Image (cartoon, helix red, strand yellow):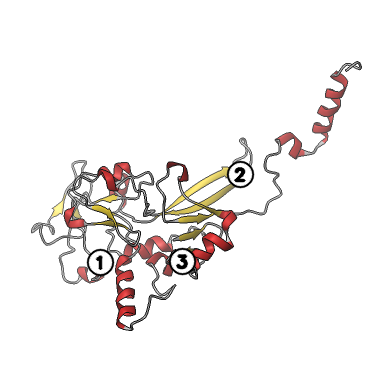
Amino acid sequence: MSIDLNTCTGCAACVVACTAENNVPVVGKKQVAKYHEMHWLRIDRYYAANRKDQFDDVNVLFQPMLCQHCDNAPCENVCPVAATNHSSEGLNQMTYNRCIGTRYCANNCPFKVRRFNWLDFTGADSFPDNQQPLIDEGGMDAIVMDMNDDLTRMVLNPDVTVRSRGVIEKCSFCVQRLQEGKLKAKKASRPLIDGEVKTACMQACPTDAIVFGNYNDKESRIYKIRKEEQTKRTFYALEAIHVLPNVNYLAKVRNTDRHVGVKEEEHDGGEAHEAKKEEKKEAVPSGH
């Protein structure tokens, strides 16, 4: 996957699409306040001022952050039951019915993109009392788990596993769409065409900032972006720690009149700067 930060506007359409496609539970404001958010994809915001004392002119950068599906994933080698593993296609997989909820993988993930189901948000059938109100100890409002109702369960995507309480979940690159595309190609006795399978975030992005494809195919769009078109802008998140992510970013380029690498007084170009130059000349002895 390649994400172009030059065209990303931070609209969060990808976040909503990911939530709807993959049955990600909506936990509510009070659970988010406890750091129990469940989004598989988040929009990180970075702020930068031109000068240390100037905060009225601040540049903002939006960076979608999801599971990087690392080839040297630090989450895989700490799982005691091998619930997270690497597939032959380069995906970092999660086996939900094998996960015992140790959260070692979430602690070892440098990108913090793994989510733990603290409550039975989607109402698994294994909990008979999931429709009873749950009162928090702090006196917060009751949370009614009514996802076992036939009407409310119609919002769930039948192609995606519904996770129960006590397991880790994360971005899967919409593996259900990958499987559907491969089955269609197999039925038609043809290879999978580049661009035929789109992840939910890629499909929903209004600026076409997200590109997903087969990097091993030298004719694919993702290969051309990384190797031919945007080589100077390509970078990987936390590349120094050598986790070898399968998601690359294209750096944002701004057209400004600010001179990067020039001292502030030189950038001013005013009379004060010229006066400082004259003072330095007068301070130097004539014999030197």
Kindly report the distance in space between the C-alpha atoms of the residues bearing marks 3 and 2.
30 Å
Question: As drawn, is 229 to the left or to the right of 68?
Answer: right
- SS label for mark 2: loop
Q: Which residue is mark 3?
A: 205
- What amino acid is labelled 1 in the image? Val
Crowd tier of the residue under label 1, counting other residues whose Cα lies within 10 Å: few below 14, some 14–19, many 20 or above: some
Q: Which residue is mark 1?
A: 160
Which mark is drawn over residue 49? none
- SS label for mark 3: loop
The residue shown at (23%, 51%) is 117
Report the front residue among 54 and 135: 54
Kindly report the distance in space between the C-alpha atoms of the residues bearing marks 1 and 2.
45 Å
Please provide percent x and percent y for residue 17: 37, 65
Q: Which residue is mark 2?
A: 56
Tell me whether the residue at label 1 lies in contact with that at label 2, contact meaning CB atoms closer than 8 angstroms.
no
Task: Identify the residue at the far bottom of this view.
Answer: 188
Note whether residue 252 is visible.
no
